[in-house]
Image (cartoon, rainbow, N blue to C red):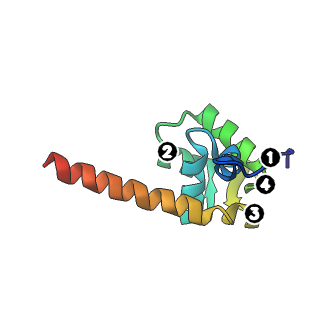
Amino acid sequence: MKKRKIFDCQDGCPVESTIQFIAGKWKSVILYHLLQNPTQRFGELNAKIPGCAPRMLARQLAELEQDQLIQKHVYSVSPAVTDYSVTAFGKTLAPVIMAMATWGNDFNQAMTTSTN
């Protein structure tokens, strides 16, 4: 894992400690999908996140792997098969990611209700 900064708990700092792992448009979304279905291949994730270009998805997966939030398993078959899963450390973010999902669902529902 690359060395991450430990913030000194001034206002907002605990949030910064979390954000440094899930910052970026797609990392939280990737974690959400991997928490919903624990082992997925690149193509499956790519299909679930159509707004994310394959190159960006690969970059975000590599960063999540570098931070030890996910692990990549490459099978030595032809053609090569790679799948991704959340590590034990990554699973500690589940309450955060699921709270974001709940808030997003509530927001989407409120917006749908208010426009009708």
Instruction: Residue type at mark 3: give it.
Output: Phe
Q: Nearer the viewer, residue 21 or 43?
A: 21
Q: Which residue is mark 1?
A: 66
Can residue 3 be seen in the rendering of this structure? Answer: yes
Labelled pair 2, 3 in contact (Cβ < 8 Å): no
On screen, 88 above or below 83?
below
Which comes before the other along the chain, label 2 or label 3?
Answer: 2
Q: Nearer the viewer, residue 36 or 47?
A: 36
Disc 1/disc 4 C-alpha distance (Å): 5 Å
Which comes before the other along the chain, label 4 or label 3?
Answer: 4
Secondary element type, mark 1: helix
Task: Please rate how many residues cluster around mark 4, counting C-alpha atoms within 10 Å: few if below 14, some from 14 to 19, many from 20.
Answer: some
Q: Residue furthest front?
A: 10
Disc 4/disc 2 C-alpha distance (Å): 21 Å
Secondary element type, mark 2: loop
Which residue is painted at 87% across and 45% down in the image?
3
Instruction: Residue type at mark 2: give it.
Output: Ile
Dot in front, 1 or 2 = 1
In the rendered structure, find residue 68 and report the number of the disc placed on it: 4
In the rendered structure, find residue 49 and report the number of the disc placed on it: 2
Which residue is painted at 57% across and 47% down in the image?
43
Q: Is residue 5 left or right of residue 107?
A: right
Secondary element type, mark 4: loop
Q: Position of residue 90 (x, y in %)?
A: 70, 60
Q: Which residue is mark 3?
A: 89
